[in-house]
Image (cartoon, rainbow, N blue to C red):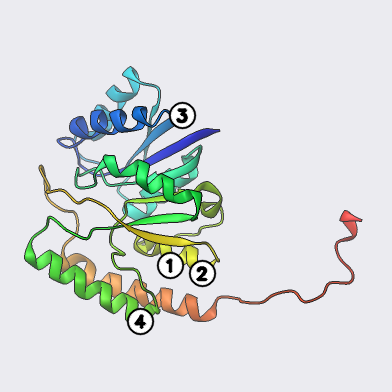
Amino acid sequence: MLDLSVVIPVYNEEENLPHLWPELRAVLERMRISFEVVFVDDGSRDRSAEIIRGFRAADPRVRLVRLKANAGETAATDAGFKSARGRHVVTMDADLQNDPGDIPMLVRHLEQWDCATGWRTRRDDSVVRRLSSRVANRIRNALSDENIQDSGCTFRAFRRECLRSLELYRGFHRFIPTLLKMRGYRVVEVPVNHRPRRFGQSKYGIRNRALTAFKDLLVVRWMKDRVLRYDIAEDLGGDPARE
């Protein structure tokens, strides 16, 4: 088994990819581990898939998983999880705003935790985006009884075993730490760097995510209220197959 899989959802990132891969490769090689980088092309309409094929031709540690049509970030993340072969899994964005240099720190936290999720303490975004994110996080925490400071940050590291039974629905990539905590896994939030966007525009805005994210939040709240919680006190019969 590989030491690490890095899963990167990609949607129309042809300008960012040629900068991301060399920087990421250099960081991973300095870690002196076995790794793969799984680029999941989410139905891009530009040259993203072609560029990734070029990376793969030069380095077999690069993999391309290409979805037939644009299915959204959660679907691309899920496809990456199912394809990953590493003992540890890191997810990050392809837009260069996540700093690959934070990966060793995130992975080190897996020595004591099941998931380390990033917290962009100094966001390099517009005032409107920073304020809207702050308000959204407060609402999410209030309604979901959570304490995640930055649920919108998808720069995360996981132990592979905590992803095996993870069932995601559209839009639920934002709530993965909460879903894992519901299953008893240990989640820690750690500060990560956040860099300015160099190319292209954000795929998300206040208008196209606020209502949908709020509806998703209500579903997660319902799930937390209904999750089964019990401990076996005694089992005299046991499993005959094991006797």
On screen, residue 229 above or below 206: below
Cα–Cα span, label 1 and label 2: 6 Å
Q: Residue tagged by mark 2?
A: 182
Q: Position of residue 212 (x, y in %)?
A: 28, 70
Circle 1 residue: 178
Please, is residue 93 above or below residue 175 in the view? above
Disc 1 vs disc 2: Cβ atoms closer than 8 Å? Answer: yes
Mark linked to residue 143: 4
Q: Is residue 112 above or below residue 152?
A: above
Which residue is under mark 3? 34
Q: What is the number of the mark on residue 52?
A: none
Q: Is 119 displayed left or right of 37 in the figure?
A: left
Q: Nearer the viewer, mark 3 or mark 4?
A: 3
**Helix, strand, or loop for circle 1?**
helix
Q: Position of residue 35 (x, y in %)?
A: 43, 31
Disc 3 and disc 1: Cα gap in Å?
Answer: 29 Å
Q: Is label 4 in a helix, a strand or a loop?
A: helix
> Which is more N-terminal, label 4 or label 1?
4
Please, what secondary structure does the residue beneath circle 3 have?
loop
Q: Residue at x 20, y 68 (%)?
A: 133
